[in-house]
Amino acid sequence: MLAREVHWMGEGGIEAALSRNRCDVLISQTLCVTLQIFAAKAGSLVISVPVGV
């Protein structure tokens, strides 16, 4: 289990997605708890910006 988390925090996670796509930010829906958990474990910054309808 720990090996999977390490993979998703590094080469298979947010940093890899940013590098692979040459992006600076990753945008997702506000209530995407899974992304927030992996970002927190990897030490990545998460900013929530409300968007009105």
Image (spheres, helix red, strand yellow):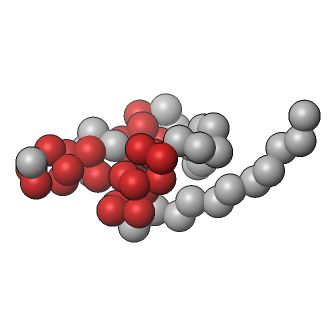
Q: Residue at x 48, y 47 (%)?
A: 33
**Is residue 10 left or right of 45 when viewed as pictured?**
left
Image x and y of residue 32, in percent:
53, 41
Image x and y of residue 40, in percent:
41, 63
Q: Residue at x 9, y 48 (%)?
A: 1
Can you tell which quarter of the image residue 16 is in?
Answer: top left
The relative height of residue 29 versus residue 5 in the rendered view (above or below) is above
The relative height of residue 24 versus residue 44 in the rendered view (above or below) is above
Numbered-mark total: 0
Image x and y of residue 29, in percent:
63, 38
- Residue at the far right in the pictured view: 53
Q: Residue at x 42, y 37 (%)?
A: 17
**In which quadrant will I find the C terminus?**
top right
The relative height of residue 27 versus residue 48 in the rendered view (above or below) is above
Image x and y of residue 51, in percent:
83, 44
The relative height of residue 19 versus residue 45 in the rendered view (above or below) is above
**Is residue 49 left or right of 5 when viewed as pictured?**
right
Can residue 19 be seen from the camera position used here?
Answer: no
Can residue 33 be seen from the camera position used here?
Answer: yes
Can you tell which quarter of the image residue 4 is in?
Answer: top left
